[in-house]
Image: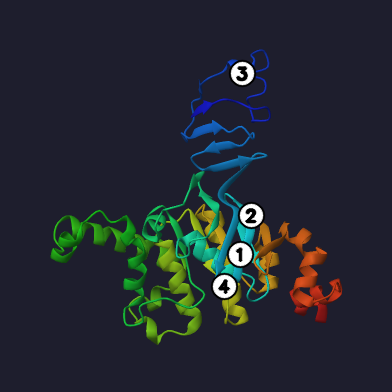
Amino acid sequence: MVCQGWRPGIVGMDDYFAESPPQSIRKITITTSDPLLVTIRPAGQLECGSGSVHGGVVNILEISQLSLSFGGVHALQDVSFQVPRDTITTVIGPNGAGKTSLFNCISGFYKPQQGEIRYQGEPLKGVKPPKRAALRLARTFQNIALFRGMTVLDNIKLGAHVHMKTGLLGSLAYFGRARREEMEIREEVERRIIDFLEIDHIRRQPVASLPYGLQKRVELARALAMRPKVLMLDEPVAGMNREEKEDMARFILDIREEWDITVLMVEHDMGMVMDISDHIAVLNFGQVIAEGEPEEVQQNPEVIKAYLGNSDIDSLRKRINPDREAA
């Protein structure tokens, strides 16, 4: 790892520089198994190849003063928050708060009029959606966006096309390198993703014949085939029954813990959100009104007012955990 500059508080550096003025240090080299380029910015922000570091926390995704308007309608207004690496961060808010518009800005489908999105420390301005996908920024959609006439396996394999090296003509010929790449992708999908999501029994079925809950699982599988570093899930349990929700929550937790993937999620199921989220940002009328850990957000008066129209915290608790309150 090569570090340029230094500031107090970097783990393992304070003792090293105790007898040397930091201003005299131009470059140091540290042996590490994970080489990263680290640069100190004037504001004391540590910049690195895996994201920006604030207070010892690596933020893989940063949203800064993002604004998006459609004519006179302000979908997003000065939205700022961070997504720490290796966490489940959830964006919540009432209908029409701007959550999906935020996802579309991060994915590159919408171009905000103001603000900046940084992914792994690099700005995404001007980066088109296919390139963002190739950078391992994957997402699912609120409305299922699968090819209904294709099989489950073929739908999932499509997610890996951004990593294929074979050109158009080679793919059409389906010979040599193209054939080898396709076989490698198929093996990876069947061995890792299909087994992980427990959908082996439906892999050869057309998507149109599947119930809604399984279609949502197939869409998740396709996103995993993109080998993401950040997985964006837009309402992953919407329309599901309790058993399907529990399965999906388990998969999301395992994706974070076993696959080392950072999850950014939009979801309305408050029980699930509070159970599995590490960090929550709350949007209302296109603005961030609260941010923090689930317990902190749950007690915030502005959040309670946005959802209930008043500050009745007992009503919010009943909405979040209806079964527990009934018992």
* Mark 3 or 4: the one toward you: 3
Q: Which mark is residue 80?
A: 2
Whole-angstrom CA distance, mark 2 to mark 1, is 10 Å
Dot placed on the residue nearer the N-terminal end, 1 or 4: 1
**Pointer 1 or 3: first along the chain:** 3
Q: Which residue is mark 4?
A: 235
Disc 4 crowd rating (10 Å Cα; few below 14, some 14-19, many 20+) is: some
Is disc 1 placed on a helix, strand or loop? strand
Q: Which residue is mark 1?
A: 76
Q: Earlier in the sequence, mark 4 or mark 2?
A: 2
- Mark 1 or mark 3, whichever is nearer to me: 1
Report which quarter residue 319 is drawn in. bottom right
Can residue 198 be seen here? The reply is: no
Q: Distance between the Cα atoms at labels 2 and 3?
A: 32 Å
Q: In the image as oriented, which residue stretches furthest toward the front?
A: 72
Instruction: Please state which amino acid type lies under the numbered disc 3.
Output: Gln
Quadrant location of the C terminus?
Answer: bottom right
Mark 1 and mark 2 in contact (Cβ < 8 Å)? no
Q: Nearer the viewer, mark 4 or mark 2?
A: 2
| Mark 4 secondary-structure assignment | loop
> Viewed as shown, does residue 157 lie left or right of 101?
left
For label 3, the residue is 23
Could you say where residue 326 lies in the image, as x and y percent from the top left?
81, 82
